[in-house]
Structures are given as C-alpha cells and as structure tokens.
Image (cartoon, rainbow, N blue to C red):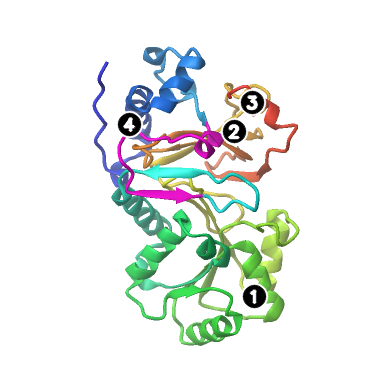
Amino acid sequence: MQIQKPQYNLVDITNDSFQTIALKVFHYQAINNLVYKEYLNRMSCKIKTVNSLEKIPFLPISFFKTLDIITENQKPQQIFLSSGTTGTERSKHLVANTKIYDESFRAGFAHFFGNIKDFTIIALLPSYLEQKDSSLVYMISDLIKQTNNTASGFYLNDYQTLKEKLVQLDSQGRKVLLIGVTYALLDLIDLYSFQLKNTLIMETGGMKGRRKELIKEELHSILKRGFGVNTIYSEYGMTELLSQAYSLSDTFFQTPPWMKILIREVEDPFTLLPIGKSGGINIIDLANINSCSFIATQDLGKIHSNGKFEVLGRFDHSDIRGCNLMV
C-alpha cells in the first residue's frame, strides 16, 4: 500500500486542522517509516482503525539511540547528535530536509518573541559547541545570522568579555536575548552580578553532570537574583524533535501550533491521562514529517487547564518499567 507524503505548511496549521494533518502524517509514516512500521506491527496496531490522536502509538525516544529513523529511506542532509554524557549512547536524528527545521524554529521564535531582527542574541552554550553536531547550536547559529547584528554571537568560556558585552548592550537599551545552558548561566552569575533591564535570560536546561540538579522554581529564583531580572525564560527541545516549546512568564511551557503534548500513564504507556494528571510526556511534532512525528519521551510532566504543560523531571529506573512495555 502506497501513501503519499502529506503536503502542508507549518505556519498554516491551526487547532482545528491539527488532528486532520496529524492523522495523515501518522498513516504516511506508519507505512513509509520502516522502524515505526515494525514497531506498530509488534504492537499489533491496526493502522486503518487509528482515527484520533488518542489512538496513535508513540515511538519510544530510546529508539533514536540505536536505529536510523527516517521515512522512505531518504538520504539525510544532516545528522544531529544529542549532547549526552561520558559513557552514554548519543541519540541521532537523521534530518532529510534541513529547510523544514529552519522553517520550524524560525516560525516558532517569531510566534513567541516577534521579529528576530529586533534582537541581539548572545549564546552561552560551551558544552554543545564542544561536542559538535548539535541541533541547538544549528538553531542558534541560524537565529544569530537572522538578527543581522554584529553584536550577536557565541561565547565559549570567556565570561569576562561576555559580562562586559551584556552590560554594554543593556545600558544602550538594546533588546538582548541571552540563551544559555543552565550550568553555564549559573557559572556566570557566580562570578558577576547584574541588574539587567533590557535583556531576556533563557535557559535551555542541562547541568551536564557539572552541578547539582535543581527544581525549576529554585533555579529560576537563583537566576533572577543573579541577573537582576523579574522573569526567566526556558526552551524545551531535544535532538529528536525539530520544534521547540518555550516558557515565557512562568515555568509552564507553550507549544507552537504544529506541536502538541499528550500525557501517558507511566505503568500503562498506551493509556493517555486527562488534564492535571502527571505522567510521561508524549510529543507530536509535525515538523518531523521525514522521521517520526510521534515520540514518547522519558520526561515526566502534566498539562494544565490553560493548555500549557509542565516538565516535572525524568523517569527514574523504577519508572522505566512502564516504558519497557513499549519496547
């Protein structure tokens, strides 16, 4: 059975059209993505009966560590690797068309923050820059270029120069976005204190084994004091996705219209939970048309009545047994 690839523009997707498009993507990938097809077969999924988002089986994210997940055996233009830590296997995302990724993160940024050319972007992502092949570095590199601003750029470990640049730009009234891996932002405010008035601070998560993990509220409280700001922004993305969610004024994330979060039961991963209940985070990312748009992550979270979602942590080894049912 041959199913043609669905054609759609991410920016045209609405709440009303999301399910229709997602189901078309599911039926396309269920036939044309060999890994997903085999997984559905082993789950005894009757593809033709899947007629709602709630009936879609989600592929365990761990499969990206060992298998090449791509539709129609396309040749990838780019392979992104997860940051990982020493001794751990890194996930890989085979991206057949990087233009779709460009469209997704550019439109996602505009959706939440407005015109990229209004910003100076300062990036503090030392561990990602060192490991190469990072989808986050790819995205930030492009956004820096899109600002068309010579003051935008990456900083590795030169905290003094970064401090001087931040203070200078902020005092000039420039609209600045400082985006950084969590441990590096904490390192910066250990060395210097700030009172920034025109700068947005965005953490991408990740202690990378260099600091003790903190709950989100405690982390944001420390960062607010250190940078002298009232709000800390967050980015939620991962190597296996081509879209990002953002938190803007609290610790709750919002998705762009082409991305959707569902929450699954931990012990029974094929059962979805209602709003307000905590469980495993499932993600539908319609930018992932060339790999798999339906991913069961190893993050724990819940959806709130306002449509935003919260990330509560990651599965520990005891929680993983629910995930193992899928594998």
Horizontal and vertical percent for residue 58? Answer: 50, 28
Figure quadrant of residue 182? bottom right
Q: Is residue 10 left or right of residue 228?
A: left
308 relative to 148, above or below: above
Q: Which residues are magenta?
A: 60-81
The residue closer to the viewer here, 12 or 136, is 136
- Earlier-in-chain disc, 1 versus 3: 1
Of 307 and 121, the residue lying toward us:
121
Helix, strand or loop at label 4? It is helix
- Residue linked to disc 1: 188
What type is the residue that disc 1 sits on?
Leu
Q: Name the residue tied to disc 2.
A: 275
Residue 217 image offset from top left, x and y in percent: 70, 57
Q: Say whether disc 1 or disc 4 marks the residue closer to the N-terminus.
A: 4
- Marks 1/2: CA distance? 38 Å
**Label 4, on which residue?**
21
**Mark 1 in CB contact with mark 2 (< 8 angstroms):** no
Three-letter residue code for mark 2: Ile
